[in-house]
């Protein structure tokens, strides 16, 4: 398997990988309930609240931000 391949994983595995801060973890959300998504992202990943707001904003432009040792890419689809 290609070490850079995208591999779907369970929600628990994605949380574990993101918390380990090893490699890249891509989190794709299809949001129906913004408050539930906000709670999920803040509670499970500890993302900065402003990053979560950006990610959930329907009007947000693509953006790359660096906070501490993390890179956050927001790509509204």
Image (tube, rainbow, N blue to C red):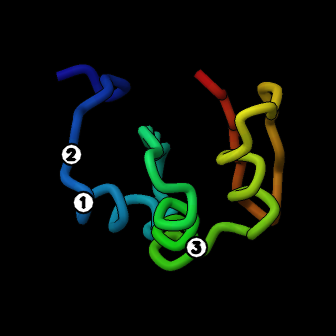
Question: Is there CB contact under 8 Å for labels 1 and 3?
Answer: no
Callout 2 crowding tier (Cα within 10 Å): few <14, some 14–19, many ≥20: few
Which residue appears at 75% of the width and 56% of the height? 53
Residue at the far bottom in the pictured view: 43
Secondary structure of the residue carrying tag 1 is helix
Q: Position of residue 56 (x, y in %)?
A: 66, 47
Secondary structure of the residue carrying tag 2 is loop
**Is residue 3 found left or right of 23 in the rendered image?**
left
Secondary structure of the residue carrying tag 3 is helix
Gap in Å between the C-alphas at discs 1 and 3?
Answer: 17 Å
Numbered label attached to residue 50 = none
Quarter of the rendering occupied by the N terminus: top left
* Count of labels in the image: 3
**Is residue 9 found left or right of 47 in the rendered image?**
left
The residue that mark 1 highlights is: 13
Q: Position of residue 45 (x, y in %)?
A: 51, 69
Gap in Å between the C-alphas at discs 2 and 3?
Answer: 20 Å
Which residue appears at 26% of the width and 20% of the height? 2
Upstream in the sequence, badge 1 or badge 3?
1
**Is residue 3 found left or right of 35 in the rendered image?**
left
User: Which mark is nearer the camera, 2 or 3?
Assistant: 3
Figure check: 16 above or below 65? below
Numbered label attached to residue 42 = 3
Q: Position of residue 16 (x, y in %)?
A: 33, 67
The residue that mark 2 highlights is: 9
Which residue appears at 68% of the width and 46% of the height? 55
Figure check: 34 above or below 40? above
Q: Nearer the viewer, residue 67 or 62?
A: 62
Q: Nearer the viewer, residue 6 or 37?
A: 37
Question: Is there CB contact under 8 Å for labels 1 and 2?
Answer: yes
Callout 1 crowding tier (Cα within 10 Å): few <14, some 14–19, many ≥20: few
Q: Position of residue 41 (x, y in %)?
A: 53, 65
């Amino acid at each position: 398997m290609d070490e850079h391949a995208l591999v779907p994983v369970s929600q628990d595995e994605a949380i574990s990988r993101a918390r380990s801060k090893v490699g890249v973890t891509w989190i794709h959300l299809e949001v129906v309930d913004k408050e539930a998504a906000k709670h999920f992202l803040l509670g499970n990943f500890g993302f900065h609240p402003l990053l979560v707001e950006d990610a959930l904003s329907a009007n947000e432009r693509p953006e790359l931000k660096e906070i501490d040792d993390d890179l956050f890419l927001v790509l509204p689809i």
